[in-house]
Amino acid sequence: MPPGTAIAGRVCAGTELAELSRSERFLRACRGQEVDRPPVWLMRQAGRYLPAYRETRSGVTFLEACRDVDRAVEISLQPLRLVGTEAVILFSDIFVPVVGMGVPITFSPGPTLETPLRSPAQVEALAGGDPRAEVPYVFEILGALRKALAADEVPLLGFAGAPWTLAAYLVEGRGSKEFGAIKRMLYGEPELLRELLARLTDMTVAYLRAQVEAGAHAVQLFDTWAGLLSPAEYREWVLPTHQRIVAETAVSGAPFILYVKDSAHVVPELFQTGADVVSLDWRVELAQVAERFGAETSLQGNLDPSALAAPPEQIAQRVQDLAEAAAPARGHILNLGHGCLPETPVEGVRAFTEAARGLAGVR
Amino acid sequence: MPPGTAIAGRVCAGTELAELSRSERFLRACRGQEVDRPPVWLMRQAGRYLPAYRETRSGVTFLEACRDVDRAVEISLQPLRLVGTEAVILFSDIFVPVVGMGVPITFSPGPTLETPLRSPAQVEALAGGDPRAEVPYVFEILGALRKALAADEVPLLGFAGAPWTLAAYLVEGRGSKEFGAIKRMLYGEPELLRELLARLTDMTVAYLRAQVEAGAHAVQLFDTWAGLLSPAEYREWVLPTHQRIVAETAVSGAPFILYVKDSAHVVPELFQTGADVVSLDWRVELAQVAERFGAETSLQGNLDPSALAAPPEQIAQRVQDLAEAAAPARGHILNLGHGCLPETPVEGVRAFTEAARGLAGVR
C-alpha cells in the first residue's frame, strides 16, 4: 500500500509522526492518538519457537527461569533483537504472584496443584497484598528491562492473569478442557467462589500497580478461560472483576489492555470494562468490532497464531487486511489472536513484524 | 409455569397437541409447527456418565461396540429407559464411515492415525461412495432401533461428523487443541485440502441419505472443530460443505439439524445453510439468536453440559429460562450446548428431562 493511502480515516504522512519512537507509537495507539502506522508485538513472543529461548531456558525449571533476574531479562529481550517485535513484555507466568500467595503450584508443564483449592480454609489461607515482598524478582526484572530499553525507547509491558482464569486452574488443580470444578463451585458454593475471586482481584490490582511503579509503560490482563462461560455467567462472574481491576489500576496512568480468549459471545462486555485497548481473539470480525466499538477504545490483534505458518506473502496480505479492518477504530496494535505456538516458524514471525513495518503511512 | 402461559407467542393448550407422540412433537418442533412443549434429548446421552453404558461397553473396544449390532442397539436405548430423554440417537462414532473408507483409525481413546493423512496419494486412496457396503452394521442398527421404537413412537436420529472436523483429525493424525496441521494444509496446499473435503462431503451425503432410508426420522451433522477458524476462513472452507450436505440430504425429507461447537462468531453463517434446526453451543445468547434468526429456522440447545452438576432446582430454572429465551423461534428442542460429560451426575440428566416435561403448555 502506498504511503498515505486513506484507509484509516485519519491518515497522517506528516514528518513528526514518521519520527515516532516505538514507545510513543505504542502508547499513542493505546490512547487513540494519531500515529504513522500500527505498532506490532506478539503475545508469547518470548517462547519455545525461538531457538535462543530454548537455549536460555535449558537446565532450569520454568519457575526458576521466572525467578532468575538475568535470565528473565535475557529472555524478555530476545524477540526484540531476533524477530523485530516493537514492544517487550516481562517474561513471567500468570501463576507467579499466586505462588507468592503461598499456593504450592508446580509446572508439569502446566500449572498443577497436588490438592486443588476447594475449601474455605484454603481460600482463607491465601496470603497476598504485598507482591513486592512476595515476588520481588518480578519488579527487579521490570526495572532492569526498563533500564535496558531506555536508549531505544521501546515500550515495556507488564501483565497479570485474570481472576477467573487463575481460579479455574486453582479449583481444578490442573489444566482442563472444560474446567468443570470451578463451575461446580459456582453452582454449589457461590459464596466461596466469590471470596476466592475477590482475593485474586485484590492481588491482581496490587500486582499490576506495582508493575507500573517498577517501570511498565502499559499492562495487559489475560483471561484465557473466561470464554468458557455463557454470556449470563460471564456478566455475573467475570465482567465485574475486569471492571474493578481496570478502575483500580487506572490510578497508575498506564494504558490497560484486556485480552479474553474465545470471547466472540461477549464482545460488548469487553468494551464495558473501561480498558484502553481490547485485544481480540482471531474468531471475531475485526472490521465489525472496529465499526461498533472502536471509537472509544483501541483494538489489538488478531491474526490466528497458526497463520504464521503460511507463506510470507500470505502473512503480509493478512497484516494488510487486519490494518484495513481495524481502520475505523481510534487505534490499533498489530498482534496475534492468542499466544505464539511452539511450532511457529521464526520466519513467519519475522514476516509478520516486517509486514507491519511496511504499513508506514496507513494510520 | 402454569399450562398455557404465553411465552411462546403461539401457545396452544389444545387437547390434540397435548396428545402428541414423542415423534410427532420432535418432528413438528424441527419444522416449526405448533407443539405443546419443547421435546428434549441430550447430545452424547448414551455415554460414560451412565453406569449401564459402562457395563455394556466393558470388555470391548469402542469400534467393536459400534460394530456389534445388539450391543449398539442396547446402548442407544439406555437413555430412553434410564433418564427420560425423548429421542434416540444411533450409537456410533463420527469416524465409523471414515474407517469404512479404508483409513486405519484406532481409538486411544480419541481417533488416532499412525500416518496422518497429508499426501495426495492418501487422499486419492480414500474409498467411499457406498456406506451400505462399507459399514453395513450402521444401517442394521438403525433398522433394529426403528423396529424397537415403533410401538412407542419415539424419534430416531442418525448423525454424521462434518467434513472439516473429520479432516482436522485425519490431517493432524490425532486430537489437538489447535489443529495446526490442517491449517498448514489450508495455507500451503489448498487444492489438496479442497479435494479431501470434497471427498468427505460426498461420503457424508451418501451416509446420511442411507441412514434416513434405513429408518432415521431426522439427522444431525456435528462440526466440533470448525469453530477454530476465523469468520472469513469459515465462510470459505466450512459453510459450502454444510450447504451442500443440507441441500443434497434434503431429498430424503428428514429434518436436518446442524451443530457447530464454538460458533458464536459465525452465527449468521449457521442460518445460511438451509438446516431445519440449528443446534447452539451454550456460549451464544439464545434469546438474541431466536429473535434474529428463529422465524425461519428452529433452534436446539443450549445448556452448558457442566450445569447438569448444579442442584436440581437450578437445572429446572435454567430449563425454564432456555424455553423462554427460545420462545421467539418457530420451534425449540431442549438439549445441551455440547455433549454430556463423563462426570455428569445421572440425577442431573433426569432433572433436565423432567423439567422439560414440566413445561407442558408453553409452546
Image: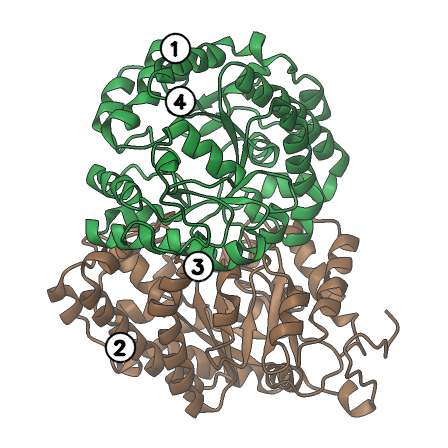
Chain colours: A green, B brown
Spatial separation of the CA atoms under disc 3 and disc 2: 30 Å
Chain assignment, label 1: A
CB within 8 Å, label 3 to label 2: no
**Residue at (53, 46) in percent of width and height:** A178
Comparing labels 3 and 2, the label whose residue is closer to the camera: 3
Q: Secondary structure at mark 2?
A: helix
Chain assignment, label 3: B
A25 w.r.t. A235: above or below? above
CB within 8 Å, label 1 to label 4: no
Residue at numbered disc 4: A91
> Could you tell which of marks 3 and 2 lies nearer the N-terminus?
2
Label 3: few (<14), some or many (≥20) within 10 Å? Answer: many
CB within 8 Å, label 3 to label 4: no
Q: Which mark is residue B227?
A: 3
Residue at the extreme front of the image, as rendered: A15
Chain assignment, label 2: B
Q: Which mark is residue B180?
A: none
- Residues at marks 3 and 2, common chain? yes
Residue at numbered disc 1: A69
Which of the 4 image quadrants contains residue B188? bottom left
Label 2: few (<14), some or many (≥20) within 10 Å? Answer: some
Label 1: few (<14), some or many (≥20) within 10 Å? Answer: many
- Residues at marks 4 and 2, common chain? no
Q: Amino acid at mark 2?
A: Glu
Q: Amino acid at mark 4?
A: Phe
Identify the image quadrant of the N terminus of chain B: bottom right
Label 4: few (<14), some or many (≥20) within 10 Å? Answer: many
Residue B268 image point, x, y percent: 52, 70
Q: Which mark is residue B134?
A: 2
Comparing labels 3 and 4, the label whose residue is closer to the camera: 4
Spatial separation of the CA atoms under disc 2 and disc 1: 62 Å
Q: Amino acid at mark 3?
A: Gly
